[in-house]
Amino acid sequence: MTEQASVGQALEIEQVGQLRGAVIPVTPFQQNCTILWDDASMQAVVVDPGGDVERIVAAIEQAGVSVERIWLTHGHLDHAGGADELREKLNNAPIEGPDQRDEFLLQGLEAQASAYGFAMRNVVPDRWLGEGDTVALGEHRFEVLHCPGHTTGHVVFVNQAARFALVGDVLFQGSIGRTDFPYGDHAALIRAITEKLLPLGDDFSFLCGHGPGSTIGAERRSNPFLR
């Protein structure tokens, strides 16, 4: 859980129904794009394809999986900037998420990227997500939690059976998401973490948008932003 995988290297996340995954760091921001799949059916999802789409496609091919969906946690360019291109390359695999409150960010991806010298596309998801929705990877069901603060429409994907979550830029090992954007809200972010993530249980493991993953218990005990 705490190491990043090079292209094509399978990183086992949880042995529940053969759920496996690989983390592909993308863009100069080293964002953790995650390929998650069921080892029995080889059905897969790609979470937060922020860019470097050719690397993501190469990893998909090397893993030998069939991507059914693309999931987005939020609308920042390093998480969503490659989504439209990847959808096209994957025969229009549907994009799910984030919450519609991030629509303005997804419609500003091209402008965001140009400020950094990147070429990225704006994107419209096939399905907006909200609190209480579910998304599926084969037989694996993930609950959707709306966790604003870093962005207004940030969502988190939670698999209760595997005791595993994909939390984007809400919570990190030893840190939390930035809230110094015009739309950021530190109080809302802390509230989302304390009211929605911490109650999941100390044994819950998670992958985040940057850096190594962690567990809820480790962050409850040692994360300085949660004391």
Image (cartoon, rainbow, N blue to C red):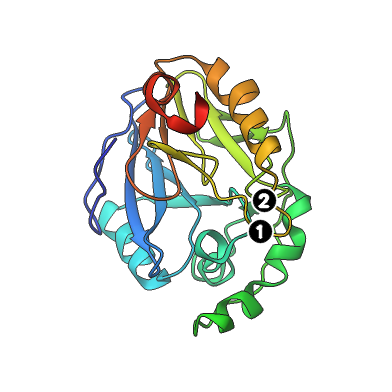
Instruction: Give whichever of 196, 158 is nearer the camera.
Output: 196
Residue at x 51%, y 80% (from the top left corner): 116
**Residue 109: x %, y % from top left:** 64, 72
CA gap between label 2 and label 1 equals 8 Å
**Residue 3: x %, y % from top left:** 24, 43
Please, is residue 32 above or below residue 15 in the view? below
Q: Quadrant of residue 18?
A: top left
Q: How many marks?
A: 2
In the picture, the quarter occupied by the N terminus is top left
Instruction: Give whichever of 51, 87 is nearer the camera.
Output: 51
**Residue 42: x %, y % from top left:** 37, 42
Residue 51 horizontal side relative to residue 23, left or right: right
**Residue 106: x %, y % from top left:** 68, 65
The disc, 2 or 1, on the residue closer to the chain's N-terminal end is 2
Instruction: Give whichever of 108, 41 is nearer the camera.
Output: 108
Marking on residue 181? 1
Marking on residue 106? none
The residue tagged 2 is 151
Please, is residue 100 above or below residue 225 in the view? below
Q: Which secondary structure, mark 1?
A: loop
Residue at x 59%, y 48% (from the top left corner): 73
Q: Which secondary structure, mark 2?
A: loop
Residue 78 in view here: yes
Instruction: Give whichever of 168, 175 is nearer the camera.
Output: 175
Badge 1: how crowded within 10 Å, few (<14), some, or many (20+)?
few
Amino acid type of the residue tagged 2 in the rendering: Thr
Amino acid type of the residue tagged 1 in the rendering: Phe
Residue 39 horizontal side relative to residue 187, left or right: left
Badge 2: how crowded within 10 Å, few (<14), some, or many (20+)?
many
- Cβ atoms at labels 2 and 1 below 8 Å apart: yes
Please, is residue 178 above or below residue 52 in the view? above
